[in-house]
Image (tube, helix red, strand yellow):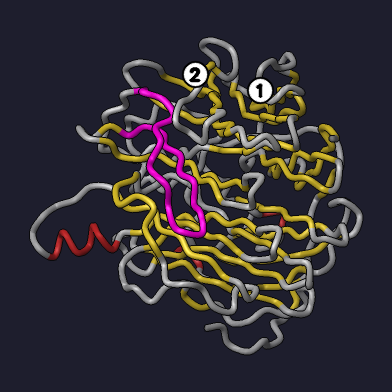
Amino acid sequence: MMKSIHSISWRSLLPKVLILGVVGVCLHAHAQVEHSSHAVKSAPTQVSNTCQGTGLECANAATPFFTTDGKLLLAWTANGLVSVAKSTDLGKSFAPAVSIAEHGKALDTGSDARPQIVSDSKGNIFLVYAFFKDSQWNAQINTARSSDGGSTFSPPQSLVQDGSSQRFPSMLLKSDDSIFISWIDKRLVTAAKQKGTPRLGGSIAYSKSYDGGKTFQAEKFANESSCECCRIGVSLDPKNQAVIAYRAIFPGGIRDQATQLITSKGAEPIRRVADDNWKTDACPHHGPSIAVSGSGKYHVAWFTQGTKRAGVFYANSSNQGLSYSNPVRVGGEGANVSRPYLLAIDRQVWLVWKEFDGTASSVYLKHSQDDGVSWSEPRALAKTTSYSDHPLLLRQDQNVYLSWLTRTDGYQLIKVGHK
């Protein structure tokens, strides 16, 4: 599927990088698709337009990945350009960035949109991102790959051949070096509209590659009815199977969280995480996070504005989603909480999120050593009054890091725990 590798020009990179320090927050989204029913707000609500560069110092979203030899890959978007750079010192400095693609204002930079990147044991790097094909917010997911450790990348090309809208790719690398990718797909909505039958939302589609992203299997649907504008959470279970979490559309227009196990035979039944009873036709732009521990326990954190509960919550399941624990609020009662993210190693689980106090945004962390039965008291990791990306967690060997990008303090990689 992929074309031959060719060289892409290098751009200078002038990131402002810290390994420790102050950090920050924002919920960024396209005004045309953001809806008033999404009450969670964070300051500032827009990326500063005073930063006009395409380097990391002007990025709106940055996604990290550790290679098997310990290098840090970072993919980001800034002013319409998708870039990748590599660090050998845990993000203190980066090699010159490689420009992947430039889409200008058409690049998808919504609050739940970000480039995704993985690297296999052979050093092959695979990248996906989305851009808008037209003024109706119909998007295309592009892929690019590198076989020389990130020095050059193939020309970007569409992940699927279907002409409808595909958006919000979410990706992981399995232990056998195969790639699992899922996304929000609008082909069923498009087909229904062509027949004069309006249909809300989108669908959860997925595919797999066993050759480093050169080719992908025919895409399949995990759920034909999902929210159209929320990222998909994904994690691996102990059997090397993908488990996804997303905002499904249940009967009656209820948009609550669901999980599904994806096996070699296909998608298992849809499992509802909680009965929040959020009935809305709006786009929350606020997807969930999932981490599967070494025991196979599902840990899920999500945002809701349902009639039964509102805010950010956490729950877990010991039976592959057949039933979930009672939801527990994340953050203090009345606090403005957003963007939870989970990571699990064996029976240890880490949970981070953002809180906005009206002036500053802070990242908080909780840690469980007994598979989510009990948790440490929340502790603040960092704080900022400027724009920032979502907090992300990633693992390198036995260490766990917080990855956070802020306009004031640049990109930061902060060690928060170890196995």
Judged from the image, the secondary structure of the residue bearing numbered disc 2 is loop
Residue appearing at x 40%, y 17% in the figure: 309
Q: Is residue 387 visible?
A: no
Q: Residue 337, how many percent across, how many down? A: 55, 23
Residue that label 1 marks: 372
Q: Which residue ends up furthest to the top in the rendered image?
A: 333
Q: Nearer the viewer, residue 40 or 213?
A: 213
Q: Where is 358 relative to 115, above or below?
A: above
Q: Residue 284, how many percent across, how many down? A: 39, 37
Q: Where is 379 relative to 408, above or below?
A: above
Magenta region includes residue 265 = yes
Q: Is residue 118 visible?
A: yes
Q: Nearer the viewer, residue 381 or 211?
A: 211
Residue appearing at x 86%, y 42% in the figure: 398
Q: Residue 121, how many percent across, how many down? A: 78, 67
Task: Tell me the kind of residue under disc 1.
Answer: Gly
Q: Which mark is residue 327?
A: 2
Frontmost of labels 2 and 1 is 1
Left or right of 222 in this view: 125: right
**Label 2, label 1: how many angstroms apart (C-alpha)?**
12 Å
Q: What is the quadrant of residue 179 in the picture?
A: bottom right
Magenta region includes residue 292 = no
Task: Tell me the kind of residue under disc 2.
Answer: Pro
Left or right of 9 in this view: 226: left
